[in-house]
Image (cartoon, rainbow, N blue to C red):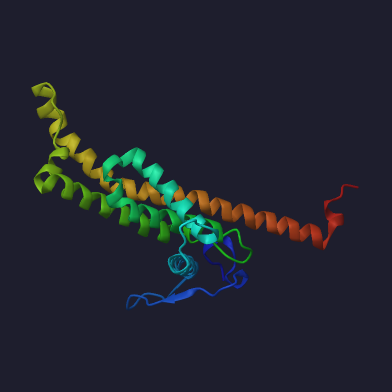
Amino acid sequence: MAAEGGLPESGHLFPALHLPAVPGAPAVYSLAATYGLIVMGALVGGAILVRIAMEIAPVGIQNLFEWLFETVEDLARGILGAATDRFLPFFATLFCFILGCNLIGLIPGCMSPTASYHTNLAMALAVAVMTQVAGISAHGFIGYLKHFLPPPAPILIRVLLLSWLWPFLHILEQFVRPISLTMRLFGNIFAKEILLLMLAFVAASFLGSPDTFVRS
């Protein structure tokens, strides 16, 4: 049976996770959920180990985690400035999870959870909700709604065009952005999964019968 990530289900190291289905709907078996839980477990386990063995001079896994955290902090601070400290835990968690999901697919017999659009959509929706909450928290509900109002313009253009087009485009953007984030990551990682599958097939074919690749 075909499964997520371009590999047959039997070709994976771990079985697909059986998820409860909606009454009347077929059962859901998700490899992305299986490997997503493995990545989350590895991150939580690594964080616990770092906390237990924390040293003033970081070494080993503590050094790795601190480097990842500082990398995300530098990137976020260049965009958010003073607001970085507030959102850094969320961004760092998301960064480490996506990185782990992408890398686990390089292990033979494993798939990247980000090769499934379900995983990416869940993260995109979390980011979308966080964005709306942050906007309302920073500007208040009324102040947040003001950015949907059209900018200053000649009265005729403002009334006939911007009065409806500007709010429409901003509202549409809130729905399109999660879909865009989902499909961009899905396309990149799923393409990687397919290329690795093709390379593995070519390598296995060559090792099994090298003469087929030799021109007569």
Q: Is residue 9 left or right of residue 38?
A: right
Toward which corner of the image does residue 167 lie, by quadrant?
top left
Residue 43 image offset from top left, x and y in percent: 46, 64
Does the rendering let one see residue 189?
yes
Which residue is more in the foreground, 78 or 6? 78
Figure check: 150 above or below 25: above
Residue 204 image offset from top left, x and y in percent: 75, 61
Which residue is more in the foreground, 176 or 59? 59
Toward which corner of the image does residue 103 lie, by quadrant?
bottom right
Furthest residue in direction top, as rendered = 154
Figure check: 23 above or below 82: below
Does the rendering let one see residue 115?
no
Residue 29 image offset from top left, x and y in percent: 46, 73
Q: Residue at x 25, y 44 (%)?
A: 172
User: Which quadrant would the N terminus be assigned to in this image?
Assistant: bottom right
Which residue is more in the foreground, 142 or 4? 142
Q: Residue at x 9, y 45 (%)?
A: 142
Q: Is residue 119 left or right of residue 156?
A: right
Image mark count = 0
Residue 102 image offset from top left, x and y in percent: 52, 56
Q: Residue at x 43, y 48 (%)?
A: 70
Which residue is more in the foreground, 56 or 11? 56
Furthest residue in direction front, as rendered = 56
